[in-house]
Image (cartoon, grey):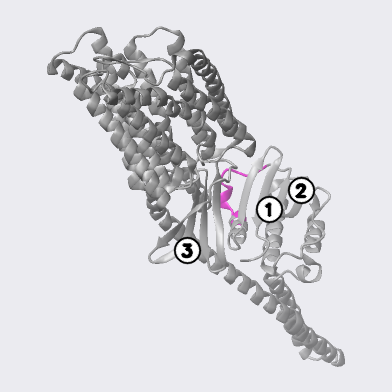
Amino acid sequence: MTGRLIAAGLALFGLLTGVAAAIVTEALDAWGYSGYAAMPLDVEIAIFYAAMGFLVTWRKPRNLVGWALVTIAAWDGFMALMTALVGAFDSPDDPAARIFEAIQHAGWSPPIWAIATLLPLIYPDGKLPSKRWWWAVGFATYGIVAYLVGGTLSEGVHGSKYTVHNPAAVPELQGLATFLVESSEVILVAASVIALIGLGVRWRRSTGVQARRLSLLFWVLLFGGAQAVFRNFVAVPIVVDHILEVVAAALVPTAVAVAVTRDRLYDLDLAVRRAIVGLVVTVTLLACYLGLYASLSFITPIDSPFEAGIVGAAIFPIALLLTRWVRQVAWGRRVDIVEAVTALGQRMRDRIEVSEVPAAVCEEIVNSLHLRFARLELETPDGVRTLAEVRKCVDDEAEPVTFVLWHRGTVVGRLLVAAPEGRTHLDEMLTQALASLADQVAPVVAALRLDEELLRSREQLVTAREEERGRLSRDLHDDVGPTLAGIRLQLDAVRAKLPDDTPAIELMDRAVTAIHDALGIVRRVAYRLRPPELETLGLVGALRELALFLSAPTLKVETQLPDDVSALSQSIEVAAYRIVAEALTNVVKHAKATSASVTLSINGDGVVLEIQDDGVGLPTDAGSRGMGLKFMAQRAQEIAGQFSCQSTEHGTLVRAVLPLRNR
């Protein structure tokens, strides 16, 4: 707390002295004197740097950037007040005027040079790029001290309503003073270039939001150096000279303000950041008005309030555009939540397949809100499952933010998003927009969850059905079949002992025939319940046997099957076998093909079945006329699989993607 209070005291001192300097200068009507030429710059530095330095040190008391800002503000404000007070007396020989002149003549330069040489080395975290950069700090400090000593010893005058000479000047040491000032100027210019290079190197090595923070200050300082060189070598009107000087100095705290508001540098809260944006907008408008006013005053004097009002009216449209631009730079691109929700609704209406809706939601969120990535997760009894994920870039600098999706008091899923590229956080406006979007997405996810539950129930029914069919098939095969076969053998034995002319012989033959037919019916029913080949040969053997059985001189059926399919459940095996059997039956009946192939592969997506033939292809009304395609599609869909059938250049391709196991 002591550090915060000291920093607050320095900031308050800089603010009060800067305001006092402006008041004294206005009271003396001294703005036009040469001794007060730098007063607008000094007042601006004292006020703006004090405000930004106070905010930084109060939030981050150990960050040297904040301490540098408040120190620069306090020093410059004090020097501005000393400059203003030099001309506040009746005579240049007044002892106070001479003391004030000696102080301001010696001490005006350190804060200006510190902005150009030291501040870039420690921005934004208050630390040097590495320990190897301490020499640059020492180099710049030596230049500042040498310039301070040279300015103290050198002769100079302060022009106001009277002329005040520097009382600390030593005539015998003017050669040394000139050497110190000129050599230190070279050193400080070199130190400024070194600091700018160091900032540029740190910028190029950074990524994301850190790179943007550094780049903003880099370009601001580069502009400051360029305008200083321009003003030094090109003769410009005094008004333009002052405007360039003031703008260059104002852009440094503005760059910090943009980083604070847009990128949440130093973690200042929303109210403070809004106040900073308001201050930046106000200062921008004021600077714009005063700049145009001063420029027009240079061309033609503005003496009446009416003329000043005309200037204000002329600048109003420019001010509106400038205000909008400043707000956009400070806050970043704002989110139109109505537009985002409308686009999302339109996108969802255009999607027919339920499985495509999650991807559409993620794509629209990423594109409309310029996010790094979005992931939609579904809450299921078995845990959380990812429905879709859309990633705009591979930068994982920011931690994902989770929005819980509630529907009718139940958590149905989660929406995970990452901040836009170049940021490490979601600001309040974007967070509110995403929370609103999450409320719109929740019913969709709830519907998908119901669809998942319905599909799971259907899969459970399919599994139970296949298990029951398997049991019935085994019972028919192991119990009913042998029983009927035994009865038939007994009847055959009885018939063999009866004379041929016995009237019961005909009845016995009918009974044997009926039992024989019953055995055939039992075998067919058992086969339809569960193909016995699956029990005896397994899926691979059963498919090979089926292909061999359906092959003929005019039709060659080939198979490409894996050796191991043990990962498949019984219901998946039955569905795969039934789909292949139905597809090959259609080839035999309708395709007029000479060759067909059955391919089965297992990958991360599941089981992929492909039945390809070189026949005549599908008729246009195949889907509505035949039951075979509907049968195969139903087989795939009831176990959460996918089915497609389409004509190709060489015939027909039937494709089914089935899960490895039931969920």
Q: Amino acid at mark 3?
A: Leu
Marks 3/2 in contact by CB < 8 Å: the verdict is no
Quadrant containing the C terminus is bottom right
Tell me the mark number nearer the camera, choosing from 3 and 2.
3
Circle 2 sits on which residue?
596
Residue 169, horizontal then vertical, whole percent: 41, 18
Observer-nearest of 89 and 225: 89
Marks 2/1 in contact by CB < 8 Å: the verdict is no
Tell me the mark number nearer the camera, choosing from 1 and 3.
3
Q: Amino acid at mark 2?
A: Ala
Compare marks 3 and 2 and give the one earlier in the sequence. 3
Q: Is residue 48 left or right of residue 488?
A: left
Observer-nearest of 470 and 63: 63
Circle 3 sits on which residue?
450
Alpha carbons under labels 2 and 1: distance apart: 11 Å
Instruction: State yes or no: residue 619 in magenta.
Output: yes
Observer-nearest of 177 and 48: 177
> Element under label 1?
helix
Q: Is residue 253 left or right of residue 419?
A: left
Magenta segment boundaries in residue numbering: 617-629
Compare marks 2 and 1 and give the one earlier in the sequence. 1
Above or below 382: residue 51: above
Residue 383, horizontal then vertical, whole percent: 56, 66
Residue 492, horizontal then vertical, whole percent: 83, 87
Residue 661, horizontal then vertical, whole percent: 66, 65
The tag on residue 586 is 1
Compare marks 1 and 3 and give the one earlier in the sequence. 3
Instruction: State yes or no: residue 268 in magenta.
Output: no
Q: Amino acid at mark 1?
A: Asn
Q: Residue furthest front?
A: 172
> Element under label 3?
helix
